[in-house]
Amino acid sequence: MFSPSFREILPLTAEVNKQGHLSIGGCDISDLVERFSTPLYVYDEFTIRHMCNAFLNGFRAEYAQTNVAYSSKAFANPALSTILDQEGLSMDVVSGGELAQARHTGFPPERLNFHGNNKSKVELVEALEYGIGRVTIDSFYEIEQLNEIAGELGRKQSVLLRVSPSIDPHTHMLTTTGVLDSKFGFPIEIGHAEEAVKRAQAAPHLEVTGLHFHLGSPIFDLEPYSSAVHYVLEFAARMRVHDFVLREFSPGGGFAIGYVPDGQPPSVREYATEICSAVIAGCDALGLDQPALIVEPGRAIVGRAGVAVYSVGAIKEVPGVRNFVSVDGGMGDNIRPALYGAKYSVVSVNSPLSPHNYEATIAGKYCESGDLLAQGAGIPVPQPGDLLAMPAAGAYCIPMASNYNMAAKPAVLMVAKGKARLIRRRETYDDLLATSVL
């Protein structure tokens, strides 16, 4: 069986079957490759449902008034939306496309929240016409635009205001969002957040229900959450001079997952204890009624559930430098290593119990020197045609995928109880040419 460290990053149902192959959700991965080819993304339904319940139960045990809203930018798909609905989660969207996939499955509009720093008028109209529960406002321009749209549609729209607490979450600078030098949110320290409260409170077609902030992701440290919660609650208390009542409060998401065996994050319960204790203590100290809490996990719901599977092709050994093992995917389906320096581990599909002591740089097939999926990865001695699985690939890989080099995006499967269903077919050359006009 896998070492305990690898167990922490693979889907919960991962095992080595009687054939000695990697199996997920009761499905032999090598059999799935025979049917669906590679690159291939495989999602474990059990792990997704388990994480939904972990967040609901973990946070509600600490703070009963908690709503868990999945951040769909991590991975949006109608099959996933159906599972989230069944498990009782709400959902955040950041674009008209993400809203469209929610509408496609009939996701309850009252459990949707529209985020984003520059929503278009068309997107906001679509959201309000669907009856969206909340819109999180991110600019003065949006206050005016949304108020106007809501008035034209004859409704009063519930909104949250996204504020920036200017607290560093100690993550990559490109995924840090709660500091002053960020395109997101109304900064508190320079007075923009207070002005936003005043303007939104005065808007006749908006109902300001609360505040939202998001520090960034993935966040492995707990302390930035409690510091930010206290700072934003202090701001909420000061806003009582403008008749502002904090009924809903969202510290966002950013909850980390393990990508490599020696990089495990806090547990869901530890995140919950830190955040909820800070909210309770802050409200008590400031004389605030405890608001409904909204947490927004994305990566933490689907990241561990997804595994990317590749076939080995060319192998280039450079003595004293490194061993390049090229696969049939790369930055076209997972740009995170090139963009953020994200680190991944690799597991052999056909020989997961063999010694993984051949040090390899897993190289993609795209025409960029930086197209390297994993560096210093341990794998069995490779041969062309071998299958390699990359755990913790369920978040942000498929949503950020591109058609660079005119490559077709991979197929995506959902597995459960020994059965696999296609939830997104592999693109074809016809798909790539469909939007071209001669």
Image (cartoon, rainbow, N blue to C red):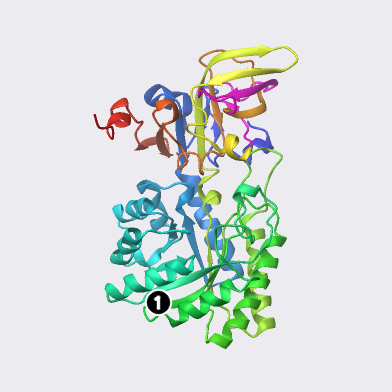
Position of 431 compared to 231: left or right?
Answer: left
Front residue (pair 67, 327): 327
- The amino acid at mark 1 is Leu
Q: Element type at marker 1?
A: strand
The secondary structure making up most of the magenta span is: loop
185 part of magenta stretch: no
Front residue (pair 178, 187): 187
Going by the picture, which residue comes out furthest to the right?
320
Q: Measured from the top left, where is residue 355 in percent x and y?
A: 68, 21
Q: Measured from the top left, where is residue 428 in percent x and y?
A: 32, 27
Q: Measured from the top left, where is residue 114 in percent x and y?
A: 42, 61
Q: For the point 39% across and 36% down, which residue is it?
A: 419
Q: For the point 45% across and 46% down, which residue is it?
A: 75
Q: Which residue is mark 1?
A: 206
Looking at the picture, does residue 126 appear above or below residue 313?
Answer: below
The magenta stretch is 343-370
